[in-house]
Amino acid sequence: MASRYWMVSLPVQNSATSLWNRLQEQISRNAFDTPLYRFNIPNLRVGTLDSLLALSDDLFKSNSFIEGVSHKIRRQIEELERVSGVESNALTVDGVPVDSYLTRFVWDEAKYPTMSPLREIVDGIHGQVSKIEDDLKVRVAEYNNVRSQLNAINRKQSGSLAVRDLSSLVKPEDIIASENLVTLLAVVPKYSQKDWLASYETLTNYVVPRSSKKLYEDNEYALYTVTLFSRVADNFRTSAREKGFQIRDFEYSSEAHESRKQELERLMQEQENLRSSLLQGCYATYGEVFSSWMHFCAVRIFTESILRYGLPPSFLACVLAPSTKSEKKVRSILEGLCNHANSTYWKSEDESGGMAGLGGEADTHPYVSFTINLI
């Protein structure tokens, strides 16, 4: 699938079929690696010249917006697939791959009646895409909020012993809690463990001998228990801190541990549900936005062709996907097929003064042309 296409229109002097045949012949002879497709545009409602000029001023901005939304949705799909590790699916419009939808474009009369004013069609497309973007922002924010909560929990569970949640590392049998005795949890630098084992019994009075047990060790620290009389716990904390050992505040609660576990499971399930729903929604809305974009492009090329070539509408619209090495040849072929008076005028103006193209794009060709980037 090509990722970049040219959408162009050429002025028709006699027969569109004859011009199409000439274009096909020259492309196949001189740029055979360039896919070429006819882009069929219905007879749209022209309106007044003033309305076309006013519309043309807005076409470039609206196109940038719609194109940007389509790319934003595609990037969101890629991110969701990357996170979940699922294989990418082809982007489609109602089951039709997007490149096929573009190259075999058919106007949707039911959705965009051709008798509607062009401004009404363009505004309708812009409004529809804006609503899709707003809805997407809400759903992405909801998904990211749950992801943030999970990331915060995971950071607590996977950080260093100095800061992480200890509930998953401590079992009920590791803790002694009675009227007189208490078990403290000491975070000991990894390379100070010998010092801890040699000194913890003497950091204060009334420490239970040989009561320290290692529960866990990471790259920086080891987690030890120590049991002592409750009334000397504060003295022990102070002496331990002076020796470089950190006593973590911890109170074991099976109910709290189970609650945290259930909350983690709930968030993980919610994240998966939101991810799946968001991914499906992105696939569907990408198709909607892409379809709207192609209809917008049809209006755009119709409008610019009339402003370029005049009335009645008489032009050949087509889509090409030239390789980088063939671009120059293809431009030369297209230019050679432009012998329309208005095209010659535009060409001479461009060559002499670099005239700005319609719709806000720099266009130095004697025919209507703009680029469609699918990615």
Image (spheres, rainbow, N blue to C red):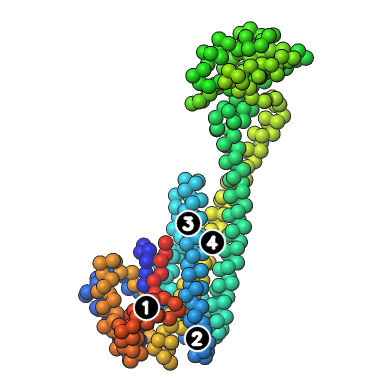
Query: Which residue is tagged 2?
Result: 52
- Distance, label 4 to label 1, CA atoms, is 34 Å
Query: Which residue is tagged 1?
Result: 363
Query: Which residue is tagged 4?
Result: 284
- Distance, label 1 to label 2, CA atoms, is 18 Å
| In the foreground, 106 or 268 | 268
Kind of residue sitting beneath label 4: Ala
SS assignment at label 3: helix
State the image coordinates of residue 130 (x, y, percent, origin top left): 58, 68
SS assignment at label 1: loop
At 49% from the left and 86% from the top, the residue drawn is: 53
At 51% from the left and 89% from the top, the residue drawn is: 50
Q: Which of pointers 1 and 2 indicates the residue nearer the eye?
A: 1
Determine whether 345 is above or below 248 in the image: below
State the image coordinates of residue 45 (x, y, percent, origin top left): 51, 87
- Distance, label 4 to label 3, CA atoms, is 14 Å
Kind of residue sitting beneath label 3: Arg
Determine whether 33 is above or below 225 in the image: below
